[in-house]
Image (cartoon, helix red, strand yellow):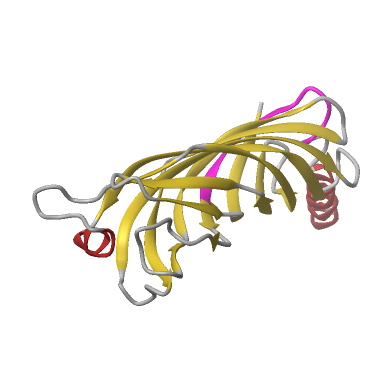
Amino acid sequence: MKTKFLLAAAATLLASSGAFAQSAGSFIVHAGGAQVSPDVDSSDLTVPSLVGTKFDVKKASAFVGGVTYFTGDHLSFDLSVAAPFKHDVLGAGAIAGTGRLATVKSQPISLLAQYRFGNASSALRPFVGAGVTYHHLSRSKATAALSGISGGSASMPTTLAMKSRLGPTVEVGAAYNVTRDWSASLSVGKTLLKTTGTLSTGQTFETSLDPVTIKFAIGYRF
């Protein structure tokens, strides 16, 4: 009898562990990690430069956190802020193989509306989202290789600046309610982002970064 009672109690606990974990009025504070992988399409660097001089930006990882507010059992709004991602800028096209030309730090801030499938009491809740992401691009550091391809010198090395931009973002993901208050989520997002790079020599290039972001986070419900 005691064994049956314990089994019944355990089953009830598991069935209700995620009850109303993601319902109207809930706040979920989340923190975790993200990887940003730019899908780069660069124009040629303006003259004077070798025809076909292009740039590539490599992927990077960083800490990310934020808060999600549920206005309904299915609709939520998510605000995420990441620590700066440090991306290597490499040569491409006619200057492929020249190695790292610079590093640039990108700090994305996203505001997304999300629609969650399933019920508020469901343990697993897939979701889709759409909104905007602002990428603050800063702290560009150039190498001697960049001076070499752009006419800089040891006394006046070439530097690189990239403009911060706002772009539309879409995402798909899923959240799993481990308990009533604790959850884990995994999402993949895509941002359409175009920016302009400017060298201290006056040369410029346009580039589409269009980053893909993979994010994993642990959340706590208030």
Give the left or right position of residue 10, taking residue 196 as reference.
Answer: right
User: Residue at the spot x=90%, y=46% of the render?
Assistant: 118
Give the left or right position of residue 73, taking residue 57 as reference.
Answer: right
Quarter of the image that includes the C terminus: top right
Task: List the single residue furthest toward the front.
Answer: 48
Q: Nearer the viewer, residue 135 or 84?
A: 135
User: Residue at the spot x=22%, y=64% of the render?
Assistant: 148
**How far from the left and from the top, in percent, is residue 204?**
42, 49
**How far from the left and from the top, in percent, is residue 92?**
43, 70
User: Residue at the spot x=29%, y=47% of the render?
Assistant: 201
Q: Nearer the viewer, residue 131 or 71?
A: 131
- State the extent of the magenta-drawn residues as a range: 21-33
Compared with 188, 53 (above or below) is: below
The verdict on residue 23 being magenta is yes
Quarter of the image that includes the N terminus: bottom right
Task: List the single residue furthest toward the top.
Answer: 25
**How far from the left and from the top, in percent, is residue 108?**
53, 40
User: Residue at the spot x=86%, y=28% of the render?
Assistant: 72
Quarter of image, res 166: top right
Task: List the single residue furthest toward the bottom.
Answer: 97
Quarter of image, res 74: top right
